[in-house]
Amino acid sequence: MFEQTFKNIDDILRKDAGCSSELDYLEQTSWILFLKYLDDLEKDKKIKAELSGKVYVPIIDKKFKWEVWAAPKTKEGKHDYHKAPSGDDLKDFVDHELFPYLKKFKTQADNPDTIEYKIGEIFNELKNKIQSGYNLREIINLVNELRFRSHKEKHEMSYLYEGKIKNMGNAGRNGGEYYTPRPLIKTIVKAIVPKIGDKVYDGAVGSAGFLCEAFEYLKESKNLTTKDMQTLQKSTFYGKEKKSLAYIIGTMNMILHGIQAPNILHTNTLSENIFDIQEKDRYDIILANPPFGGKERKEVQQNFPIKTGETAFLFLQHFIKILKAGGKAGIIIKNTFLSNTDNASVSLRKTLLESCNLHTVLDLPGGVFQGAGVKTIVLFFEKGSPTKKVWYYQLNLDRNLGKTNPLNENDLAEFVELQKTKAESKKSWTFNIKDINQTTFDLSAKNPNKKDEIDLREPKVILDEINALDKESSEIIKKIRELI
């Protein structure tokens, strides 16, 4: 039911003049879904309060409740199509009354850790792009049929929302920067092994895939007490995101996964001076896929000891600095980081090796990030002691990755198992840092267990072939001269 509803909503949005891409479809679906989710959340909170003998104070005023403007009911409890506004009336209400009302929550909320603050922040970043009030009414009617009450319903909804994020990434253009393949994220989380009580951080949060998967992992890691669940809800997951749409999608994604007031800040992580980071600001776990290829301005570069315009390299400096001593990180980055010869790359590799134990490098094949056209690696490191040995795992697949044949968890199962003991295999080996070039700090170690795929022929065979080709050429030249 949910899946068909999502398809129907997309079909309506395709017809609307205000929406032109997968990004628009997801953004517009998100704010309507959020308001329906909020309505169900309020109903659940009211029931819990009444069962405890308490009075529930609603978040949303009566005029702006979902059941008043979006889905009014008859006395019999059925949808009242006559009372429900549509067309220009609905669009005017949403644009000029509902959105302004919801935006005010940001300034009225007690602190940023509340659902009220998140409501205000989300609607300060959004606008209704659906131009036809009739299309908007159709979408609202479809969303009204969805439920967010049971665990099963929430799980299915979060799964479908992830699917929409994936489609947006596959659509190309700038959609891909919001989506990291979930099998890869799950593998990184498994390799890091977070535990209850760790503070988990992603400074380039995007669609919050890393934080959502870490939440799912920790929920299944043990039988959770009420205190454990409170810890996961309020003081475990933290993120920062620069772009408005990504911030909204990430916040919504975490909410649908069950984190009611996500600790995601809408800010440019790189605008923070890393020299100002103090112990209280640090995290136990960092999971991230920072954007690469960007060119940061000179004033942003001044916040870092190693000056570079490469966005991913600035993020890596930020992550090293903001990680606690003993903390663990899993960071996706372009594979050229291992061997680039420019000053910034060399200095950054030296810094990483001296301040952290870079114990694992996962070398990924091309095609993991569809449409990106780059090869990537995952750096796994712990802060506090210098690197002595690096264990490499080179993921070689017997197929080409693509939209119809993406990376899956089985592809990475051997890596997860072998990295526990850093075992050697045809795909894995260990490199001793004492053997590294002390000038370049080049980390692009070649797999010593992999035989060269080029069939090297014996010198005599090559010479015989050269002689045969020379003889053939001489005969051709002779025939040409005879014709002349």
Image: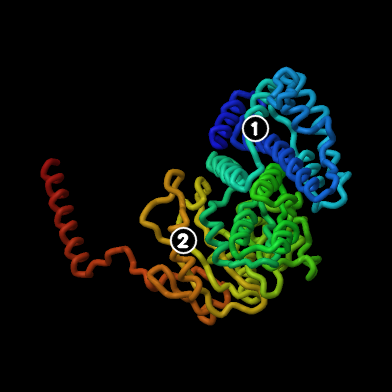
Picture quadrant where residue 102 is located: top right
Q: In x, y percent, where is residue 212?
A: 63, 54
What colour scheme governs how the chains and residues are painted in the rendered image of this protein?
Answer: rainbow
Q: In x, y percent, where is residue 170?
A: 53, 42
Q: Which mark is residue 73?
A: none
For disc 1, the marked residue is 143
Q: Residue at x 57, y 46 (%)?
A: 159
For disc 2, the marked residue is 412
The amino acid type, in three-letter code, at marker 2 is Leu
Residue 295 in the image: above or below residue 172: below
> Along the polypeptide, which appears first: circle 1 or circle 2?
1
Q: Nearer the viewer, residue 160 or 125?
A: 160
How many numbered discs?
2
- Secondary structure beneath disc 2? helix
Q: Residue at x 63, y 32 (%)?
A: 145
Picture quadrant where residue 213 is located: bottom right
